[in-house]
Image: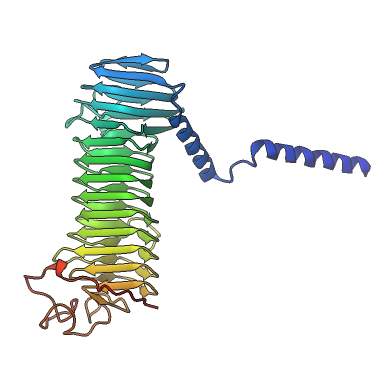
Amino acid sequence: MKTFKKSLIIILAFSFICLALTGCGPLNGKTETATASQSEKSASADESSAVKITLNGTEASISGSGATYENGNVIIGSGGTYSISGELTDGKITVDAGDENVTLVLGGVKITSTDSSAINIVKARAVTLNVKDGTENELTDAAKYDFGNGYSDESQEEPNACVFSKSDLTVTGTGKLSVTGNYSNGIKSKDLLTLESANISVNCANNALTGNDGVVVNGGVIDITAKGDGIHSNGSIEIGSGTLTIKADDDGIHADSSVTLNGGVIDIDCHEGIEGTTVTVNDGTITISASDDGINAAQKTDGVTPSVEINGGEITITMGAGDTDAIDSNGNIVINGGKITITGQSGFDYEGKAELNGGEVYLNGQQITEITNQFAGGMGGFGNMPRGSGNFGGRGERGGFPGGVPGEGFDPGAATAPEQESTVA
């Protein structure tokens, strides 16, 4: 029995030592990812051991190992930190580093490609673009791509963005980065795209910021002009903070899975404002001017009920004329808090349930106490408001505006929320 107790004590002591040495280890994959991300950021801030790449017109000089230069193409073939400066008038940067992490520090870079992407990340474990403080950087791709080189795939039309990555991509740093996507997209990752306190402007022929697996925005200043979507993901989009100005010909923010807004100042001018299977607003100042729906929950993920849930923040939606809805859900609409100001022809359209549990909701200058479906008869999505009241005179054939539907001279900007604050229980 004494021998057994001694053995048990030794085993327990050895276990505690292992736990102490490993720091208890990651609890899940998310913890591993976060740890790797922090490590990459530390590496991106340390240029003391970085490989120096100096661009000079149609040439490049490299100080250190891990990168080569061939016919206008800077090829980064191994992991590490690379500090890049200067101008490349007809060339690109290609990352082909196997399963290693790569950090590119942009310290006053101007790259113009005449046949492909400005930066093409073919293979790496993860890549960080660190835009150095106090510098201005410009990346411009070609209007037409040549897919004949060994780093392209014409059958998949890859690359297809000014900054293209097949790996997780993080853009960070307080320097300024301007991206022009003449061919299609601005910045695209086929995995996760993360923007951490970045100062970015994107002007492109299709989607500005794309992360196939997801897009995460935490801080920074982002200015987008896009012919397609402003921010696009086949997965989820999460915005924690930052100042975002989005002008898009299609959706301002589009995710096939979920859109979650936890903060920030977001100004969207677009065809459709925010779209996802689920849209959740917890905080932030959000302004949407849309020619179609303002916020739309549509069935894009099987097995998930579309929903719009608003728990906080300040949301202002101004709609264009026609068959448009400020908040449209193929499932449910639940408002628990925040302040929502809507100007337009239809406030709400939903196929499931609608709950107004808290917060303040104003429709064309009138505060409402319940949500009414525009296609369910009655007031056409404008809640408890008597006919003949409000800012629009005359009676109309359908509800939707106090006093009826406005005529052709209706000016959405004429209806504004009252100045006084009030609370709906």
Q: Position of residue 134 (x, y in %)?
A: 33, 33
Q: Is residue 308 left or right of residue 147?
A: right
Relative to residue 38, is residue 312 depicted above or below? below
Can see residue 375? no
Seen at 38% across and 24% down, the residue is: 83
**Residue 403: which quarter of the image?**
bottom left
**Residue 373: which quarter of the image?**
bottom left
Seen at 26% across and 59% down, the residue is: 287
Relative to residue 220, is residue 303 depicted above or below? below
Q: How many marks?
A: 0
Check the image and tell me how it is coloured: rainbow
Relative to residue 220, is residue 300 depicted above or below? below
**Residue 423: which quarter of the image?**
bottom left
Seen at 31% across and 43% down, the residue is: 210
Q: Position of residue 56 (x, y in %)?
A: 25, 17
Can see residue 165? yes
Which image quarter holds the C terminus? bottom left
Which is more toward the observer, 119 or 244?
244
Q: Position of residue 48 (x, y in %)?
A: 46, 22
Which is more toward the observer, 285 or 215?
285
The furthest residue to the right: 2
Q: Position of residue 163 (x, y in %)?
A: 29, 33
The furthest residue to the left: 408
Which is more toward the observer, 323 or 156?
323
Which is more toward the observer, 61 or 183?
61
Relative to residue 50, is residue 370 depicted above or below? below
Which image quarter holds the N terminus? top right
